[in-house]
Amino acid sequence: MNGVMDRIEMKRELAGRAFSVAIRMLSEKKKISKNAALIYVAGKLGRDVLQMSQYTVTGLPIYLVEPAITLFRNHGVIMAKHQLRPTDDVLKIHLT
């Protein structure tokens, strides 16, 4: 893999981890299972549960980041855009 592809894959991995953490935090806040939280988020964002599950690996598409942040914040889960959609600066921090 070349450097550009490596950075893209790393950003996806970081975004997937952040989304997975947000789902776990939501499950704790709502006192439901992680799967139930994933189903809840899928319904609220109008997506299929299988897509949501994939997003825990690849991260959310850009058009779902803001709606997801709003949804999570409405339930006391604070996530920032740079967590769900890592920037080059965030990636640099993880590489040093």
Image (tube, rainbow, N blue to C red):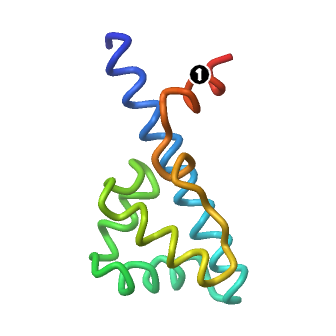
Taking 9 as reference, is 32 above or below it?
Answer: below
Residue 69 x/y as whole percent: 51, 68
Of the 4 image quadrants, the one containing the N terminus is top left
- Residue in view at x 59 percent, y 83 percent: 74
Of residues 96 and 6, which is closer to you in this image?
Answer: 96
Q: Position of residue 77 (x, y in %)?
A: 66, 72
Q: Indicate the quadrant where residue 54 lies.
A: bottom left
Q: Nearer the viewer, residue 83 or 26?
A: 83
x then y, percent, for residue 55: 39, 58
Specify the amino acid type for callout 1: Lys
Residue 82 place in picture, x, y as percent: 54, 46
* Residue name at image x 34 percent, y 17 percent: 4
Read off the residue under disc 1: 92
Position of residue 44 in the picture relative to residue 94 (left or right): left
Q: Is residue 56 left or right of residue 74?
A: left
Q: Nearer the viewer, residue 23 or 85?
A: 85
**Mark 1 packing: few (<14 Cα in 10 Å), some, or many (20+)?**
few
Query: Residue visible at 64% across and 80% down?
Result: 27
Kindly identify the residue that appears in the image at 42 percent across and 23 percent down: 7
Quadrant of residue 37 within the rendered picture: bottom right
Tell me if residue 59 comes above or below residue 77 in the rendering: above
| Circle 1: element type | helix
* 54 sits left or right of 22 in the view: left
Screen quadrant of the C terminus = top right
Number of numbered discs overlaid on the protein picture: 1
